[in-house]
Amino acid sequence: MPVVPGKKRTHKVKMFTLSTCGWCKKTKALMQEMDCEYEYVDIDVVSGEEGKKVREELKKYNPSQNVPTIVIDNGKTVIIGFKEDKIKEVLSDGK
């Protein structure tokens, strides 16, 4: 799973995305704009056993498997879809 570096590492952020999804691209851009470190997986580019494991993990957090699914702090917070205000609220730590 690629890790995108950022200065903000207060939260562990993992995103499930599609490589072709406009909302997923907006979410990744927002994370970079906020300078948050995150890891992501484009679920449409993984296949075989790895793809199966990724989809099973995604189902744990989001049974509908919508993207983007943003998992923060190992599932303490899960944000489904591009919800800019919610993402900023959770990851800004009140700043």
Image (spheres, rainbow, N blue to C red):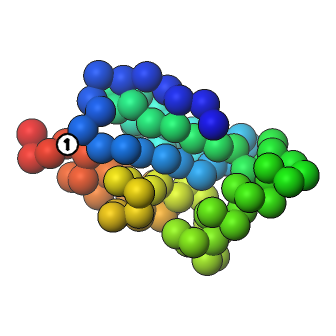
Tell me what residue is drawn at x 34 percent, y 32 percent.
36
**Residue with the most extreme left position:** 95
Q: Is residue 23 visible?
A: no
**Residue with the most extreme right position:** 48
Counting labels gives 1
Q: Mark 1 points at which residue?
A: 92
**Residue with the most extreme bottom position:** 63
**Nearer the observer, 3 or 69:** 3
Percent from the top left, x then y, of residue 49?
Answer: 86, 54
**Nearer the observer, 68 or 23:** 68
Tell me what residue is drawn at x 34 percent, y 63 percent.
77
Q: In this view, does 13 lie to the left or right of 56?
A: left
**Nearer the observer, 95 or 85:** 95
Percent from the top left, x then y, of residue 88?
Answer: 26, 47
Tell me what residue is drawn at x 80 percent, y 53 percent.
51
Helix, strand or loop for disc 1: loop
Image quadrant assignment for residue 6: top left
Image quadrant in which the C terminus is located:
top left
Tell me what residue is drawn at x 21 percent, y 52 percent.
89
Is 53 located above or below residue 45 in the figure?
below
Q: What residue type is labelled 1?
A: Ser
